[in-house]
Amino acid sequence: MLETIAKKNGIQSWEKSFPYKNIIPQRKKTGIEDFFQIEGYLTRQKIKQESILEIIEEKPIKEVQITVLGTSFSSCAPLYKIHSEIKDSTQILELEENWDDEGAKKVQESIFIEAVKFLLNYSNFIYKNFDIIISTPEINPCIDGSIDLSFRNQNARLLINIQEENEKLNAVFYGDLYDNKIPIKGNVPTKGVFEHLAHWMKNLS
Amino acid sequence: MQEVWEKEKISDKSILYRFVHKTRMDRKNRRIPSESNFSIKKGEDGLSVDWDKYTTPAKSLARISRTYKYGKEVFKSYTDFYVFSLKSGFVRMIPDIRDVSHDPIFNGDPEPIGNPNNRAHSLIKFDYHNDPEVRLKLRDHAERITVNESQVDKLL
């Protein structure tokens, strides 16, 4: 049936590019958008509910290149507010040692870049897989030379601290839906995307 | 160094003042304070605050202006600092906060230039120096206090 739908919509290389036999549709309440899980990966498709499921469009995602201190990152264009915060926050690197008059450490470029990479990894993952643009965090320096990503919206708050511990970069986090509801606390390596954290971050839409 | 002030028990009804340095990052539409204003460095005993039993926001700001900047013989300016208040009873209820304890600083009599005594000095102690839950909750609880500069100037 899906093969017929694909041909009807002019999708030629359907089977090659889309292993539809492994598709598990999960209907959302609206019936307008849906997610298909394909062998562990999530791909967003717009579908329309008629007598049968009809694929009408694959949503194109425009990507842009962001260059931060000579390092290039690819990111989805709709995340432009996050890109803007990243650009603004580069002034953190202008803070000298003792920037608070009380002995604060200078933020190292490597930690700042790792924080940017972490933020882009998660915000792009959530956008690509769940069609959610998370709220823009504030990127702040801490006195120990680490970086905070501080997220807040009406429903949720989340603080992620990117730091170096024993020569390894870690993200230590705490979040809840205010009043300690649905809390999440822990730490993850900064490399890659950990799905339990990404799923919780959907609350930041 | 002789300690002339005994450490006392801080009641849950007490108010603690936290002084936060202004930076260039405090630009328009930024949340002040941020959680980063409640971070401490690894190895530090706790987050420094002043206990309202022995100070007022104006007195503490005046003391800041009598204090040298870290590693320099240059005085701080109280106008570079925001003041926030925290209720000690609330602070003690935050998980992972070990204690709120009085930690008076006595540097000498007369007090040395640039290193004033501070009987109000206290510490909010937590085990992990950068605990995000502690910092997030302190940040959300903190209330900004506006201090009349003329009050501070009279004390200088």
Image: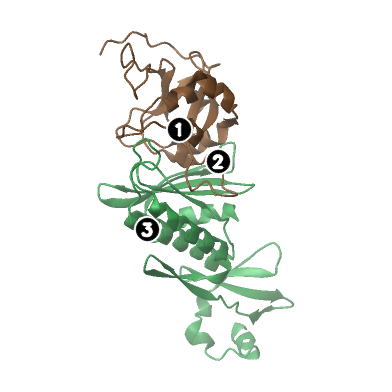
On the image, the x and y values in percent for residue A122 come to 47, 60
Identified at 38% across, 37% down, the residue is A101
Q: Amino acid at mark 1?
A: Ser
Asked if A136 appears above or below A79 in the picture, the reply is above
Quarter assignment of residue B125 = top left
Identified at 70% across, 78% down, the residue is A52
Question: Earlier along the polypeptide chain: callout 1 or callout 2?
Answer: 2
Which residue is label 3 attached to?
A114
Quarter assignment of residue A47 = bottom right
Chain A, colour shown: green
Separation of residues labelled 1 and 2 (CA atoms): 19 Å
Residue closer to the observer: B64 or B102: B64
Residue under mark 3: which chain is it in? Answer: A
For label 1, count other residues whose C-alpha is less than 10 Å away and answer few (under 14), some (14-19) or many (20+). some
For label 2, count other residues whose C-alpha is less than 10 Å away and answer few (under 14), some (14-19) or many (20+). some
On the image, the x and y values in percent for residue B42 come to 31, 36
Residue B154 visible in image: yes
Query: Which of the two discs, 3 and 1, sits closer to the camera?
Result: 1
